[in-house]
Image (cartoon, rainbow, N blue to C red):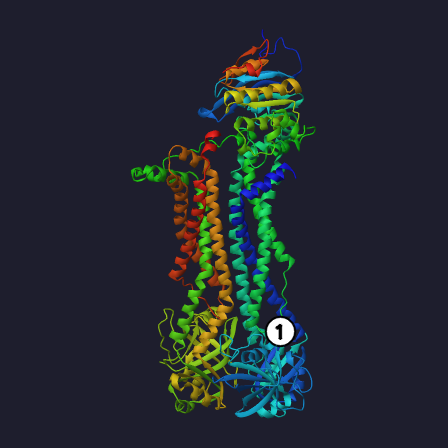
Amino acid sequence: MADRTGHDGLTGEPVFRARGLTKTYGTGEAAVHALRDVDLDILAGEFIVLLGPSGSGKSTLLNILGGLDASTSGDARYRDHQLTGAGEPELTLYRREHVGFVFQFYNLIPSLTARENVALVTEIARNPLAPEDALTLVGLADRMDHFPAQLSGGEQQRVAIARAVAKRPEVLLCDEPTGALDVQTGVRVLAVIDRVNRELGTTTVVITHNAAIAAMADRVIHLSNGLIAHIDHNAWRQAPEEIVW
Amino acid sequence: MKALDRKLWRELWQLKGQAIAIALVIVCGVAIHIMFGTTLDALRQTQARYYRDYRFADVFVSLKRAPESLRARIAAIPGVAEVETRVVAPINLEVAGFSEPITGRLISIPDGREPRLNRLYLRQGRLVAADRDDEAIISEAFANAHRLVPGDRLRVVINGRRQILTIVGTALSPEYINQMRPGSLFPDYQRYGVLWMGQRAARVAYGMEGAFNDAVVGLAGARATPEVIDAIDRLLTPYGGLGAYDREDQPSHRFLSEEFNQITLSATLFPTLFLGVAVFLLNVVISRLIGTQRDLIGTLKAFGYGNIAVALHYLKLVMIIVLAGVMVGVFAGAELGRRLSELYMTFFRFPFLDYRLTLSLVLGATLFNFGAAAAGTAFALRAAFALRPAEAMRPEPPTRYRATVVERLGLQRLLSQPSRMILRHIERRPLKSLLTVLGIALACGITMMGRFQEATIEHMLDVHYKLSQREDLAITFVEPTSWQAISSLMELPGVERVEVYRAVPVRLRFQQRSHRTTLKGVPAGGDLQRLLDADLRPLSLPPAGVLLTDYLGELLGVRVGDRLLVEVLEGDRPVREVPVVGLVKEYLGVTGYMDLAGLNRLLREGPTISGAYLAVDERAQPELYRRLSDIPRIAGTAIREQEIRNFHRTMEQTMLFFTFIATVFAVIIAFGVIYNSVRIALTERGRELASLRVLGFTRAEIGYILLGELGLLTLLAIPFGFVVGRGICALFVSGARSELYRIPLIIHPSTYAFAATVVLASALLSGWLVRRKLDRLDLIAVLKTRD
């Protein structure tokens, strides 16, 4: 019997370990089952793409793994951290120390410049990159003192990535990072994420409903209706620049 | 600087309009609190120090005449520490170039030494020399009113004899902090003066050699007061004692106490209301402001900022605004307090003012505001923290709107689409709408509170001086006189009508309660002095029984039909039981009234009068005044016109000063509330409105959607505000009742109109300011980002 977690054949230490993860919004007839009994292991250094249509449970899964949301039942761990049932202070500490987030709509603080948005995170991290280095990494060395409103969408997203990676997180969680971007800009953003994954060895989970992006991943997890429909293993990872959609 | 602090300062800058509006509201609340707090503090401290340092006496007594030897017997009464015997006499004064009658009071001071009680505070000059009988010290207020200085001469009529005195000093006395003619309601320093002469000279002038007609007593301990008073009365009754009384009945002190009570009321009510309203708004505004930052809070938390760090961040933002408001408020309040205290100083004749800003006042205001702001912040953050960061970052789920009452009634065809949006929005969030209405209503209410007194005071004056006291001139005789005086008064030039009255000092008792006042006998059917019933119609005076000022009736707890014990404090001091036959509507003072002949019968005296009211031909006034000052039996003359002017001046100086301040502050608060409401609505709904613009709505249409809601809520709030305002005014009026005056709860239509105008103007100005922001809505931003 094949392992439901879908990493049969892969070796390495699991970073995330989810068992029977279930998330229900609302109750009774109005209840929405966002996740139904999901089992999943994610290994260190992996590049995972979560693929699926709207409402398939991708974001819910990512949010639970990132400590932004709580499951209704089941079990989720990050290394030796129990995520399910953890209190707010523990989750805060977990996010602060281990997780970098990239959101579809960037979520930059509009009143802070690019550099300051990154500094917002490096100031509370243990061993961060300098904000300038993080911005250089995403190719924004010359836009550091611009406010979000003065940056294009792609640039804003790259600031968000710089902000996410500047603390040298062990995991990078990206929710539709290219969802609001055009192809060319999207490719640049994906290239940055890919580079972070390869060069810093950061375990990366990217949500998308764009199947073309899946080629970049080690594994592609297809979600549908709150369930893992199937998991694809890519024999080789396509470079972001080669992606066409 | 930390990135989070940068965010704070930048956002504070972006919010500057709102931040200033919030801070201004706080400034107003704090300034009113500090203004009244410091004033009350200053007056109380000053009074206490003045009484202590200048040895204000504890017991006072006037009598007809007693030999000086009696002094030792008074001093021997157990509990008495000190006694000063004096000559106190009514006088007429003449100042060159001032034609109206001036009356006053002569008080003797010991020869060659300072009085031990009621010491004089010499402002200028020196005490009178022991061997001089032509020297006098005059009260500072009188000296200032006539620009008299030491060295000037003054003509004084004492006991019918004109004397020329040299002023050697100007002084103040703790006995005359409130310096006004007996029977007057407000001070008139030009027409009433106090004058001090040496004991020997005063005795000679008043025919009191070897005797005294007034004594003041200092007690060893205040507890024995009633026993001491009884002992003094027993001792002095054979000598025409008029009844000893303690500080509570000493006119100046009593007036001061009443005034302090009034100020205390204002000092409690105004700051409580203003601070309360300010704090309420602060709370509402802050929580809504933070509510608009829900997604940013989610983001900060997603990156690992803990609740405490986020809470501190917002608390800092709020505290900066509050601190700025409190600081400016304390500064402004201290300055206003100084001015108000100085105004009271012209009214209460204190030699000095102990004005200081106490730490406790400042701390009180600070903590109150910080506490409210912190509560508002906590309330808003609690809601944000209750959400998982994932949820907080998501746009709020679409609100579940539904058809409004109007639509369910089938009236939707009458409403345009934008109008329906307005109604649904208000109905969807009843609490927020209610808070907005409440905020505007409160602002409307406090605006009325500041304003209504002005019109009300006019009404009081009209009732008192046009319906009730209608004479041109009131005359009091030195001592009770025969009715025959009427004919000599009628002979005076210009006198058209004379109505006499009899007034006796009495203590009225009913069950446990008693009140020292005047019982006045007036002729039935008089035209110059009329008694009014509750509906302000002239009352007919029954031949027997007593009528009381309605408020005096309340003080004594009597009703019509009850029998009152009247202790006369003059002559043989009879005690009689008299039925209460009616209550008289009076806004100023408290008095008992009887039919003149009835009172004479009650006192078992012949036809006796104490004074007269005159109707006078205006053209003959100068000649009349000249003749009056030559009549030695006349102790006081009050000109009605002048009384009205004094009333106005006093009111303008004190009450209207702070009602003006209160009005200005209320206007600021009204603006602060409304501006903030609409600014926050813009923040909350900016994206929605921009989307509508993108969909093709015009600026005017989205302006209507946002400002139409404000307009509707404002219009709803105004009548509610009238009710609130009336309630606040009623609270003030019921608290402000005193034996000096009762302010009727009459709210002139102009007060309602003013409050409504302030609210509407604030709404229009806020609407205009926000409309300009609406015109600059960033449509592209809406297209680019979520929601």
Instruction: Report the label total.
Output: 1
Is A13 left or right of A227, judged from the image as shown?
right
Secondary element type, mark 1: loop
User: Does residue B486 appear to the left or right of B162 in the view shown?
Assistant: left
**In-front residue for pair B35/B265:** B35
Instruction: Name the residue beneath numbered marker 1.
Output: B351
Q: Is residue B422 above or below residue B442?
A: above
As shown in the figure, which amino acid type bears the numbered disc 1?
Pro
Residue B500 coordinates in the image, percent (x, y): 41, 84
* Quadrant of the drawing holding the N terminus of chain B: top right
Residue A71: x and y in percent read 56, 24
Above or below for B235 versus A37: below
Q: Position of residue B767 (x, y in %)?
A: 43, 46
Q: Chain of mark 1?
A: B
Locate residue B773 relative to residue A161 in the image: left or right: left
Outermost residue, top direction? A1
Q: Position of residue B524 (x, y in %)?
A: 37, 81
